[in-house]
Image (cartoon, coloured by chain):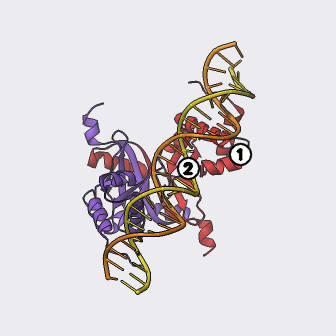
Chain colours: A red, B purple, C yellow, D orange
Amino acid sequence: MPVYQTQTRKLLLDYLQSHADESLSAGKISEDLPQISVSAVYRNLAALERDGAVCAVSRTGSRERLYRFAAAEQCKSHLHLSCTKCGRTFHMNTEQTEDLVQTVAAQDRFMVDRSETVLYGICEACQKKHV
Amino acid sequence: MPVYQTQTRKLLLDYLQSHADESLSAGKISEDLPQISVSAVYRNLAALERDGAVCAVSRTGSRERLYRFAAAEQCKSHLHLSCTKCGRTFHMNTEQTEDLVQTVAAQDRFMVDRSETVLYGICEACQKKHV
DNA sequence: CTAGTTGCAAAGAGTTTGCATGGCG
DNA sequence: CGCCATGCAAACTCTTTGCAACTAG
């Protein structure tokens, strides 16, 4: 299935790239890109995820998925920092998650394909607001 | 808000305890406990989660939440092993996630409250089926 | 008795899909 | 042109809520 170079797809990728440090919900994306219909947003996100251009994660206590631009194999080992105050989700690369995978493979004979770590807490900005 | 010792709540907790090594969806629970109405399942899971008796996580690509009996502070540092073949979610305790938290706190000034790690892959049983 | 809990059915939120139209190559 | 992508609205799935009847303490 070839992927067309549509205007919609370009807009979406541009938008995601310019927010590469954050994970966004389809709703938020759709809100910021009113030119694109909701269904097109979903269909493109799904296609881009298949192609590996976009990563998706779920968040506890919410039934919505968060999408994020994926530069190369950045998806493999990175952490999600989810702020429980402002709701934004940031990213951080680390090698420590790889170590975890090794441990699991050895201890539980579980063949890890990909991992996902979300740390819930308060981000720097919100901490400063000393609520 | 006091928590009553209802028949429903007991059934639910018993069920969760006897499946302590797995995370289950509300749907699955409701299916296995037809005596309890769906809304009661949800309301009790929410109440038990508030009390810390139950943990909840989300899974990528699905909009449903997975619930699991939480023995004490087991929630704090454990991994989820989610099999992409059979869909079951297992658990494993480790201290390595705690190290991650330390790193993040230091590097990003992110105040971690609780973490959630899901490793997606193939479980031992499914590997044996060499599909 | 009083406040928390239940079941049912209806409402919500987020996501997916069918179908006719429009656009890329 | 042919096939993929789009928009719209309807369908779906999981979860939440309103309400009257019920039950634990």
Which mark, residue A66?
A: 2
Chain-order first, disc 1 or disc 2: 1
Residue type at mark 1 is Leu
Query: Is residue A1 placed above or below A25 in the rendered structure?
Result: above
Q: Chain of mark 1?
A: A
- x 58%, y 66%: residue: A85
Question: Residue D22: x percent and y percent?
Answer: 35, 71
Q: CA distance from mark 1 to mark 2?
A: 16 Å
The image shows residue A99 at horizontal and vertical percentages of: 38, 50
* The disc label shown at residue B64, or none: none
What kind of element bears circle 1? loop
Query: Which chain does the numbered disc 2 sit on?
Result: A
User: What residue is drawn where x is 63% and y is 66%?
Assistant: A125
Q: Amino acid at mark 2?
A: Leu
Q: Are marks 1 and 2 in contact (CB under 8 Å)?
A: no
Q: Which mark is residue A33?
A: 1
Residue B39 in view (yes/no): yes
